[in-house]
Amino acid sequence: MTDRTAPTALQTGIVQLRDVTEAIKVRIRNPAKLRNLELFLLVIAWVLAGGAMVLVQLGALQRVDMMPLQLAGLLGILTLALHIALRIVAREADAIILPVVTVLNGLGIAMIYRIDIAEGATGWDAASMRQIAWTGIALLIAIATIVVIRNHRVLARYRFLAMAVAIILLVLPLVPGLGRTINGATVWIGIGSVLSLQPGELAKIALAIFFAGYLMTARDSLSVVGRKVLGIRFPRVRDLGPILIVWAMCLLVLVFQRDLGTSLLYFGLFLVMIYVATGRRSWMVIGLGLVALGGIAAYFTLGYVQRRIGAWIHAFDQSVYDAQGGSYQIVQGVFGMAHGGLLGTGLGLGRPDITPYANSDYIIPSLGEELGLVGIFAILGLYLILVSRGIRIGFQGPDDFTKLLGVGLAFTIGLQVFIVVGGVTRLIPLTGLTTPFLAAGGSSLLANWLIVALLLRLSDSVRGRGIA
Amino acid sequence: MSELTLIIIRIGFLALLWLFVFIVLYSLRSDLFGPKLTPLQRVAVQSQRSRAEAAAQAAPAAAGDAPTTVTERASAGTASGLARRVVITSGPRTGTEIELPETGLTIGRSSSAGLQIKDDYTSNSHAKIVRWRDEWVVQDLDSTNGTFVDGKRITQSTPVRVGSSVRIGTTTFELRR
């Protein structure tokens, strides 16, 4: 018996040893594989971003000017820096997010540059210069976030601080002397005459952190108890408190800051996060009911909401088209996209600058005109991939906070794209939101790169636990 | 630059944009079809499988009446009939396997418990498994919702044989050798 078992034990020992070394080898190899894939995709992303700039110059100027290209190289250098930072502090982070976002940011810079050429803007007057500078700042802050926040779960501890920050950021534009009203919406703050910021963009991240932290602790009482009506379990009246507070907050934004898009974004974010936390359809019913209620009330009391909806439904009506604040912009955007057709006019060869705000709110029609339906679908595909990665990270999250935060952050990007693209294509009424990563605007870039940094950090912790 | 070259570059740009999208989708294929094994991992899986077969062949002598998989530890002849592992067979942590220490195991919702079960039906300190002579017994620590051995709620220390099921809250586990 001993003669037979001794070699068996030795053999199993050897096999076990081999398994352990293999496991270590696999562990060392896989993350490097992810980062190498990321580098490979990044190189293509740089070629795409640089190619877009060159094509704009060839189309609009008929020559290649090195100066703007070198400036846009900052995007390349800093994304490479972020990539290297990931190699050191988050080796197992998602490999897809960074390259996809780099392409979007690069296409945005190229399109803004193209509008600058059409409008003859140079130096710091040119929106593209400011966009490149903001890209630099946003990327530096994203790198700092990745390096400083090693464990995103500590954020759950600061959920009420996050709530306070979100409310302060929301109220800031209403402070006399600090707030700026541009085109009727009071969502900017200005420091001197140079810098203007949209604090609401940053507030959405703080809100997502607060919702994730709050729902992590409250999900049981929100999901378990309640009465059943028509097969759907409704929550108790006293559990309705938080959703009513958020609803009231969004209505305040709507009334005092006159910004339809932002209030829709916040409410949608809360609704989706509470649905994900509890898995109860009744929250959707209640939430959509509240949206309908708020929407109808706003339509009858707020003039600008009425004008927006009128311009949406009767866009091609001559009187609406000619009216101040009418549908001129919407119609020009639609004409631009129609002019682009399937393959587009080619970068630098269309007339996207006819549409007001062609480089910010209307950057999607601008791109649609010059890249065509084929290009727009590629861009929407990139957004789809980005959002699906975020939701996937949330889905794999080991704890409630990670799950909720991942889904919430990814959903803000998705909802924002839907509201903007739906608005310019006349699917829903037009509201002034920025297109993530594409549109000209520093606060939006900063906020969205921060979201990218957080998603990368989340994905690293998910894979770090060997769940991937 | 001629008109034609510009058109070709333009179309080329769109093609590259789509190529990028498809490369990304291709690299995400493991999300859709499950991870592909590297040759090294395949060898590891095969060696695991062959080891399990070898253990199964050696089993009849040592296994006795227990219908469980026998690990090489048991077949090497070091173990008596005593269980060494706890395997969760249903509930949120299905498939989890933990070592059963000689000193016994506490079960409950608190983080200091040896086997932590987090649900609304588990008390902070719910039950414990201790060794009594040559067998494991489970004791209910006056929990609110009770401990069930083979479907019956226990009121006193109850011996747990290998393979019989213990249910606490929504979690069921078995002792294995």
Image (cartoon, coloured by chain):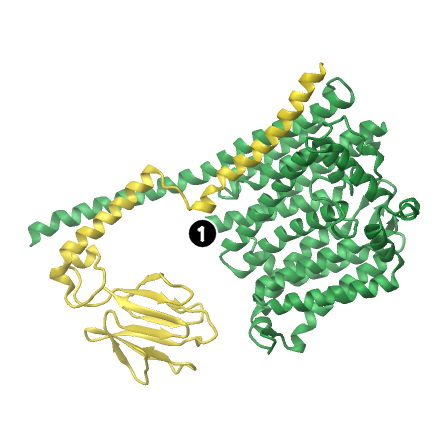
Q: Quadrant of the C terminus of chain B?
A: bottom left
Q: Residues within 10 Å of mark 1 (few under 14, many from 20)?
A: few
From the image, tell me which residue sits under label 1: A465
Q: Is residue A447 above or below residue B59?
A: above
Q: Is residue A115 found left or right of B61 in the rendered image?
A: right
In this view, which residue lies farthest toward the front?
A317
Question: Which quarter of the figure has residue A258?
Answer: bottom right
Say which colour chain B has.
Answer: yellow
Task: Answer whether residue A133 is visible to the viewer in this image.
Answer: no
Residue A428 location in percent, x, y? 75, 52
What residue is rendered at 76% in x and 61% in y?
Answer: A250
In the rendering, at what x and y percent does residue A9 appear? 16, 50
Please tell me which residue is depicted at 26% across the width and 44% down the height of the picture: B46
Residue, x 49% and y 54% (percent of image)? Answer: A396
* Front-lying residue, A370 or B112: A370
Instruction: Name the residue at the bottom extreme.
Output: B155
Is B12 on the left-hand or right-hand side of A292? Answer: left
Let me know if residue A381 appears in the view.
Answer: yes
The amino acid pointed to by label 1 is Arg
Tell which of B69 and B86 is nearer to you: B69
From the image, state the color of chain A.
green
Q: Please, is residue A111 above or below residue A287 in the view?
A: above
Q: Is residue A161 left or right of residue B59?
A: right
Q: Looking at the rendering, in which quadrant would you find the N terminus of chain B? A: top right
x and y, in percent, of residue B48 in the image:
26, 48
Q: Output the chain of dot 1.
A: A
Residue drawn at x 72%, y 65% as measured from the top left:
A246
